[in-house]
């Protein structure tokens, strides 16, 4: 029995003699070796995504000379495209964090942040336009010397915009639009009967 512990002791001594100690700096360098994340296809795709390219369309949405229906439609389109671009950045960077934290990735991080900020800003503007329109859905028009109720705008783009933004009070807003539609229909049908 004494030979077995002696054999184990000899084996451990030989193994410990073979182990090479590395310094803390060498260990850190080995653990944080730079990956080639910025040379991947994903990084190349992300580098082509810029939200600033949507500034021309955003200017159209902000143009007060356009009809409210056109502005709502353009805002909805720009907002959807910004959300998609932001989510592409988020998805890619959550799959490969080196895209965000590696040396040289600041351009991608800045582009992502710009998209997120622009999406938030457009959402605020888009919602403000919707809320402004919701203040007055039905207007008085003078036709043939009589004042009649008329819709301020086509309600379809307004309904679509409310759904696109997924507003917390969207059900209430949709009900308000339905009530406005009924008000215009009732006034329109009573005019038809009076003639």
Image (cartoon, rainbow, N blue to C red):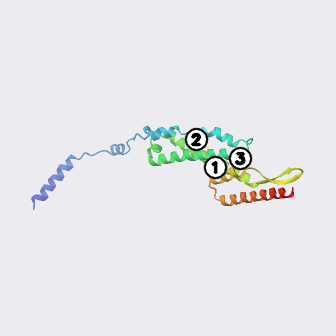
Sequence order check, earlier mark of 3 and 2 = 2
| CA separation in Å, label 3 and label 1 | 17 Å
The reply to whether the C-beta atoms of the residues labelled 1 and 2 are less than 8 Å apart is no
Instruction: Determine whether, in the image, residue 127 is placed left or right of residue 81.
Output: right
| CA separation in Å, label 3 and label 2 | 24 Å
Q: Quadrant of residue 62?
A: top right
Q: What element carries label 3?
A: helix
Q: Nearer the viewer, residue 141 or 171?
A: 141
User: Can you tell which mark lies on residue 51?
Assistant: 2
The reply to whether the C-beta atoms of the residues labelled 3 and 1 are less than 8 Å apart is no
Image spot of residue 8 (x, y percent): 15, 56
User: Can you tell which mark lies on residue 69?
Assistant: 3
Q: Name the residue under label 1.
A: 123
**Visible in this render: residue 129?**
yes
Q: In this view, does 136 lie above or below 44?
A: below
Q: Nearer the viewer, residue 180 or 165?
A: 180
Mark 3: few, some, or many residues within 10 Å (few <14, many ≥20)?
A: some
Q: Looking at the figure, which quarter contains the N terminus?
A: bottom left
Image spot of residue 130 (x, y percent): 70, 51
Q: Looking at the figure, which quarter contains the C terminus?
A: bottom right
Mark 1: few, some, or many residues within 10 Å (few <14, many ≥20)?
A: many
């Amino acid at each position: 029995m004494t030979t077995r512990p002696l054999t184990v002791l000899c084996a451990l001594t030989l193994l410990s003699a073979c182990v090479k100690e590395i310094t803390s700096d060498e260990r850190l360098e080995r653990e944080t070796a730079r990956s080639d994340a910025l040379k991947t296809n994903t990084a190349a795709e992300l580098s082509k995504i810029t939200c600033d390219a949507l500034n021309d369309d955003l200017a159209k949405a902000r143009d007060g000379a356009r009809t409210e229906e056109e502005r709502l439609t353009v805002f909805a389109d720009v907002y959807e495209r910004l959300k998609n671009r932001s989510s592409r950045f988020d998805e890619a960077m959550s799959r490969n964090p080196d895209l965000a934290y590696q040396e040289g990735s600041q351009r991608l991080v800045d582009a992502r942040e710009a998209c997120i900020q622009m999406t938030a800003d457009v959402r605020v503007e888009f919602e403000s336009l919707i809320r402004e329109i919701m203040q007055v859905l039905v207007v008085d028009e003078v036709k043939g010397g009589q004042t009649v109720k008329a819709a301020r705008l086509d309600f379809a783009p307004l309904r679509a915009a409310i759904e696109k933004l997924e507003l917390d009070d969207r059900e209430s807003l949709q009900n308000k639009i339905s009530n406005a539609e009924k008000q215009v229909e009732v006034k329109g049908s009573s005019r038809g009967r009076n003639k």
